[in-house]
Amino acid sequence: MPLLRVVDRDGIEHEIDAKTGLKIMENLRELDYGVAAICGGMCSCATCHVYVEDEWLERLPPMMSDERELLTELSHYEKNSRLSCQVEFTPELSGLRLRIAPDE
């Protein structure tokens, strides 16, 4: 099963068996240390904000303007910020390492 490495807000790394074909958010929201995903993936709340390890950024689909606009308004925005609701977890992303962003 494809692997997703998640560093929670306490700095603890977890390895999870992720399901391909789902958004990264959908793989994370069921975890105790995951994301809230309040809007359910509509790109309107940023409660699924994550930081993607730099070496994985180029493998992700490009950021759309609505995602970029929402992210850049956040106080915890970084150059490797993404909304996990906007990225589908594919087999090619197996091994992806990301960090859950602080709550806004």
Image (tube, rainbow, N blue to C red):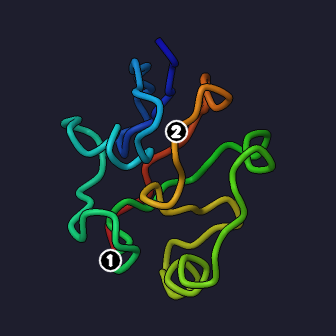
Residue 43 in which image quadrant: bottom left
Task: Give the camera-side residue of 14 and 66.
Answer: 66
Residue located at (58% from left, 83% from top): 72
Q: Is residue 97 left or right of residue 103?
A: right
Q: Which residue is mark 2?
A: 89
Measured as percent of width and height from the top left, residue 26 is found at: 32, 45
Measured as percent of width and height from the top left, residue 78 is found at: 64, 67
Please name which of the two marks, 2 or 1, marks the residue nearer to the observer: 2
Is 39 rendered above or below residue 69?
above
Q: Which residue is mark 1?
A: 45
Task: State the quadrant of the C terminus.
Answer: bottom left
Q: Is residue 45 left or right of residue 88?
A: left
Q: CA distance from mark 2 to mark 1?
A: 20 Å
Q: Residues within 10 Å of mark 2 (few under 14, many from 20)?
A: many
Measured as percent of width and height from the top left, residue 59 is found at: 76, 44
Marks 1 and 2: in contact by CB < 8 Å?
A: no
Amino acid bearing label 1: Cys
Q: What is the number of the mark on residue 70?
A: none
Measured as percent of width and height from the top left, residue 3 is found at: 51, 19
Is 104 rendered above or below residue 59?
below
Residue located at (46% from left, 37% from top): 21
